[in-house]
């Protein structure tokens, strides 16, 4: 019997396949092979250590606490719902996202896609079904071949780079119409459902909103969109970057997550009562985010650069205050009808792994609901004038996560150990770099 994947290959004349998984950083890892060699039933194999590779390509010194010392293989099994064409490939190519298992059938619990699956299963056990809608910000920049030089906005159709901030400018987006035409076409080819595209605050900074839906599907779309934007930009000799803070004096790039929960039986939003007023579960969900966001910030802000975005009086939040239609708060409740009542988590950076950021955001809300927590009063003024309530460094974030027993229990000790190990190795590597600021101000003054 022909499988859905094999039918897709046949219908689209596919000659090559990219079998991919998202690693800890959200980078696509895997294998490329001829379509006739694609082993859907038997699965494919990669070393378990693929999840311990750092963003620099290195590995932690001692990995025995996280993986089998024998460096065993894991089995990759295709998720048929994720098969799509690779629209920028020269040959007819398909990509398929895979889930990861051990040879005895157990899930690889540290795999980011499995972390999100586990959180969704907790919701399902209570008859709940989360709904999310990510918003991704990114910058377009000139190709940067020397990392010692700052990034620059690219030249658009007019032959000029943006001279300053052009928030919500249609003309500034039109400067890159040929590029966005490619992005829209590539997204359509891959069933990535873009709702809107706007120009954000920074020079050549854009934001796309994905249509709301199932969290795993939306994580897949966000994962694929990052790759799509980069590939489309390269066609036009431009870089698309999802760094949280690529420019020193410009706003950072976020991944905001709108989230709500519906009852699986009735399809009704459990954040609203029948009379349309907010429910207790709605307030508890917010309270869970307030309580547990600090312990999960390393999943929303997973890189050293991420914390440069979280600065006072910029557009990014600095605490877990919440408010109605308040963009200075870490948690914003947009104006909406009762059926669409939701919370917008504004803490995450665009550099986060979408699977882990969505899993962590839903995990915080889940714990709030099952623990029956109560939030603080909503804030009506500027939350930027209040004290910091979020970790300021990656090191602090990782220590908070390791010490939060409820979150470690929910996300899984194996995952937390592996993730922290990878990020601690990256942090130690970063500390070996001496910056130009240090040479400028300390060399002859201290």
Image (cartoon, rainbow, N blue to C red):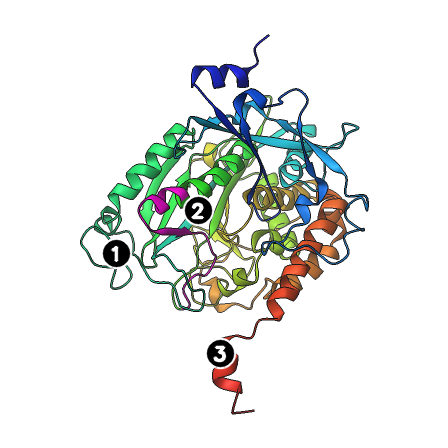
Of pointers 1 and 3, the one earlier in the residue sequence: 1
Q: Position of residue 394 (x, y in %)?
A: 62, 62
Marks 1 and 3 close (CB-CB < 8 Å): no
Quadrant holding the C terminus: bottom right
Q: Residues within 10 Å of mark 3 (few under 14, many from 20)?
A: few
Residue beneath disc 2: 136
Q: Which residues are magenta?
A: 231-248
Question: Where does residue 175 sit, x and y in percent of width and height?
Answer: 23, 49
Q: Residue 32: x, y in percent?
A: 54, 33
Q: Are marks 1 and 2 in contact (CB under 8 Å)?
A: no
Give above or below for 76 relative to 197: above
Q: Nearer the viewer, residue 84 or 237?
A: 237
Q: Give the Cα distance between marks 1 and 3.
A: 29 Å
SS at circle 1? loop
In the rendering, at what x and y percent does residue 443 appear?
53, 87
Q: Residue furthest top?
A: 1
* Picture layout, residue 324 above or below residue 424: above
Question: As displayed, is residue 209 above or below residue 310?
Answer: above
| Badge 3 or badge 2: first in the primary sequence | 2
**Which residue, given by chain and number where applicable, does mark 1 sit on?**
155
Q: Is residue 341 visible?
A: no
Q: Residue at x 47, y 65 (%)?
A: 384
Residue, disc 3 = 437
């Amino acid at each position: 019997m022909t499988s859905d994947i094999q039918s897709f290959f046949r219908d689209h004349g596919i000659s090559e396949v990219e079998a991919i998984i998202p690693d800890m950083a959200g980078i696509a890892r895997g294998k490329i092979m001829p379509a006739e060699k694609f082993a859907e039933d038997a699965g494919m194999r990669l070393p378990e250590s693929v999840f311990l590779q750092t963003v620099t390509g290195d590995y932690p010194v001692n990995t025995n606490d996280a993986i089998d010392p024998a460096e065993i293989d894991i089995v990759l099994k295709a998720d048929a719902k994720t098969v799509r064409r690779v629209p920028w490939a020269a040959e007819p190519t398909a990509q398929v996202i895979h889930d990861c298992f051990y040879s005895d059938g157990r899930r690889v619990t540290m795999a980011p896609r499995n972390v999100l699956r586990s959180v969704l299963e907790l919701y399902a056990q209570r008859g709940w079904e989360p709904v999310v809608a990510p918003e991704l910000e990114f910058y377009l920049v000139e190709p940067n071949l020397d990392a010692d030089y700052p990034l620059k906005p690219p030249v658009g159709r007019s032959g000029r780079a943006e001279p300053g901030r052009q928030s919500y400018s249609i003309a500034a987006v039109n400067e890159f119409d040929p590029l966005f035409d490619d992005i829209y076409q590539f997204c359509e080819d891959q069933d990535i459902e873009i709702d809107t595209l706007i120009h954000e605050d920074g020079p050549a900074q854009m934001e796309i909103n994905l249509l709301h839906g199932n969290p795993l599907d939306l994580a897949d779309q966000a994962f694929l969109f990052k790759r799509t934007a980069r590939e489309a930009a390269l066609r036009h000799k431009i870089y698309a970057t999802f760094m949280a803070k690529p420019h020193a004096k410009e706003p950072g790039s976020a991944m905001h997550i709108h989230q709500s929960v519906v009852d699986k039986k009735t399809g009704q939003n459990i954040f609203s009562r029948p009379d349309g007023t907010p429910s207790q579960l709605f307030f508890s969900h917010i309270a869970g985010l307030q309580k547990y966001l600090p312990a999960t910030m390393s999943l929303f802000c997973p890189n050293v650069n991420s914390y440069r975005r979280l600065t006072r009086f910029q557009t990014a939040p600095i605490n877990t205050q919440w408010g109605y239609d308040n963009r200075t708060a870490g948690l914003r409740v947009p104006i909406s009808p009762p059926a669409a009542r939701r919370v917008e988590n504004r803490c995450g950076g665009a550099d986060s792994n979408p699977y882990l950021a969505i899993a962590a955001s839903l995990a915080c809300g889940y714990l709030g609901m099952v623990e029956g927590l109560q939030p603080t009063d909503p804030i009506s003024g500027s939350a930027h004038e209040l004290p910091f309530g979020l970790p300021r460094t990656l090191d602090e974030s990782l220590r908070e996560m390791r010490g939060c027993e409820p979150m470690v229990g929910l996300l899984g000790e194996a995952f937390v150990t592996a993730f922290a190990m990878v990020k601690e190795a990256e942090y130690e590597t970063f500390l070996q770099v001496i910056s130009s600021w240090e040479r400028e101000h300390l060399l002859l003054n201290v």
